[in-house]
Image: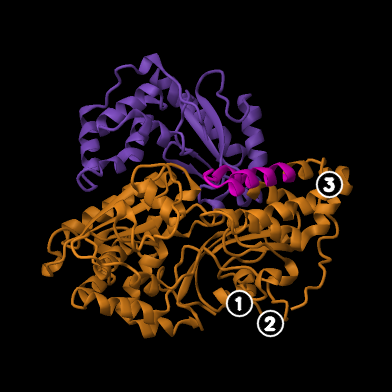
Chain colours: A purple, B orange
Amino acid sequence: MESSIKNNPAHVGCTFSADRLTEVDRLMKQYPEGKHKSAILRILHMGQKDFGWLSVEVMDYVASLLNIQPIEVYEVATFYSMYHLKPVGKYVFEFCQTGPCCTRGAEKTIDYIKNKLNIEVGGTSADGLFTLKTVECLGACGYAPMMQVGDVFFEHLNEEKIDTLIENWRKEAASKN
Amino acid sequence: MAGKKILLANDHVEGIRYYDAYRKHGGYTSVEKALKMTSDDIVEEVKKSGLRGRGGAGFPTGMKWSFLAKPEGVPRYLLCNADESEPGTFKDRYLMEYMPHSLVEGMIVSSFALGANTSYIYIRGEYMWIVSILEEAIAEAYKNGWLGKNIQGSGYDLDLYVTPGAGAYICGEETALIESLEGKRGNPRMKPPFPAIKGLWGCPTVVNNVETIATVPHIINMGGDAYAGIGVGRSTGTKLISACGNIRKPGVYEIEMGISVEEFIYSDEYCGGIADGKKLKAMIAGGSSVPILPHNLITKTAAGEPRLMTYESLADGGFISGTMLGSGGFIIYDEDQCIVHNTYTLARFYHHESCGQCSPCREGTGWMEKVLHRIENGHGKMSDIDLLVDVAKKIEGNTICPLGDAAAWPVAAAIRHFRDEFEWHIQEPEAAQRGNYPHWENRPEVVA
């Protein structure tokens, strides 16, 4: 869990697209009048997806959408482990390291990624593409070793699969540049 | 024997994730039936069924429902706890992913029984793709007149929404879940007042696990007495078990309560035995919070009786020689697994997930993690073992939510049953770095 929040000048004046604002409106209406703050977690997920990570500027923008004080957003964003409070790579590996995954070799696979990308846990590869984080139980114990990247669970991982995934993501990133 | 299946009887049907196939195979008939019943009658059927909360605590569902306050003019809420985060547990995910309509149907019947007109499914944020699956199922239910205004002409209105979390084990605790749903940090609340009196936005609220809610339609369809006829004694019905660790066939299985633990571990219908021809060393039966058992107490109780997959049999012997069915998160450890290492990873988990409100939990979980880390890495002292027992004791029962107990129990149980392995790690650090504890099979006899 991160405990400090950071500014990002590049996020000054950030706004959601029109479609995203329609979605924000739909989410806020799922709760009774005056209780729309309940939509905060999901809107923060959207902010993270669109802007990469949750800077002070993104959180302030979310506060303005919900018409609440910025501190109400900061205190929520710093509590939940899925939010990135500092810059991360294009692909964030959230690798499960809890007991059941360890019975099936999670730690060895994490070490393999560290060596392959030459990074430590929490670090980002030199090309800015990959960040490795370790996380606690993701509810995929039977399909270990596993990691979450974005909204997708990658399960039954081994070194070969890791190689293929990284290669594909490198290609994907190169084709978009 | 082939066990009876209720929740997963149709999980293999093609297209069962979608409305048409689900409806064709009997889906939503419980709503038709329930809308013609009174809410009291529905609660009565659930009471008769003996259904107990499937999230871990095992509290009788009908009784929980009957505690719900019903002040005039105040909305009531039903919240589904889909924050499945207990290590070893991945059963609700399976149900929601493959049979989302079974949860939607259960939410409609249960909301009607409780008089709730707005209900929410709070799902862990990591299951984001399941949010889409559930929202798609909900949209289909609206389109076919099972949600919204005047459901099937009954005059009953219900809106159902999905709210994802963002990574916090603690939000599986019901008052933390409510805080999170209100858009706050997931800090558990002091109780009383209980959610049944003051829950979401201060209104009477029931929080039930996914599997619990998905079972309700079956109880309505077959009747509470018929459901109570399945299983053994006070462990009625079926239970989803997510099996993982060193077994041949990890996965989610529906068992009839009362099959033996031996059958569950070794039969090809379920876990298929220990992987790679290894020996069974230890088992956690109900998610990482429940006590671990050594090989000699798994298939038989201390009294020598066959151990069954029921609330009572798994708990036989109390914490001295028993464990708990809990969430049904079943973790198997083979002879190559190190108990000290496993206990360390679980202590790290609870330290990471402690919300930090209560000092015994906030400080104690971190302390246990540190001590276990040094034992694991060959820097332990013999006094560390009793220190761990002491810290665990001082957390247990001294926090406002059960996370403290959940963190203390696995450490206390590991030392209770495997003290010699901890001692070996401390006395023979070099050997412990190189290999596994050689004497794990010699467990002291436990007197019933």
Which residue is under mark 1? B313
Which residue is under mark 3? B432
> The residue tagged with tag 1: helix, strand or loop?
helix
The image quadrant of residue B402 is bottom right
How would you rate the neighbour count of disc 3 (Cα within 10 Å): few for under 14, some for 14-19, many for 20 or more? many
Q: Is residue B17 left or right of residue B276?
A: left
Residue at x-position 50% and y-position 65%: B57
Which kind of residue does numbered mark 3 sit on? Answer: Ala
Residue B162 lies, in percent from the top left, at: 31, 50
Compared to residue A96, the image places residue B301 above or below, namely below
Which residue is under mark 2? B305
Residue at x-position 55% and y-position 46%: B354
Residue at x-position 34% and y-position 73%: B66
In the image, B363 versus A29, the foreground residue is: B363
Q: Chain of mark 2?
A: B
How would you rate the neighbour count of disc 2 (Cα within 10 Å): few for under 14, some for 14-19, many for 20 or more? few
Respond whether the residues carrying marks 3 and 2 are from the same subunit: yes
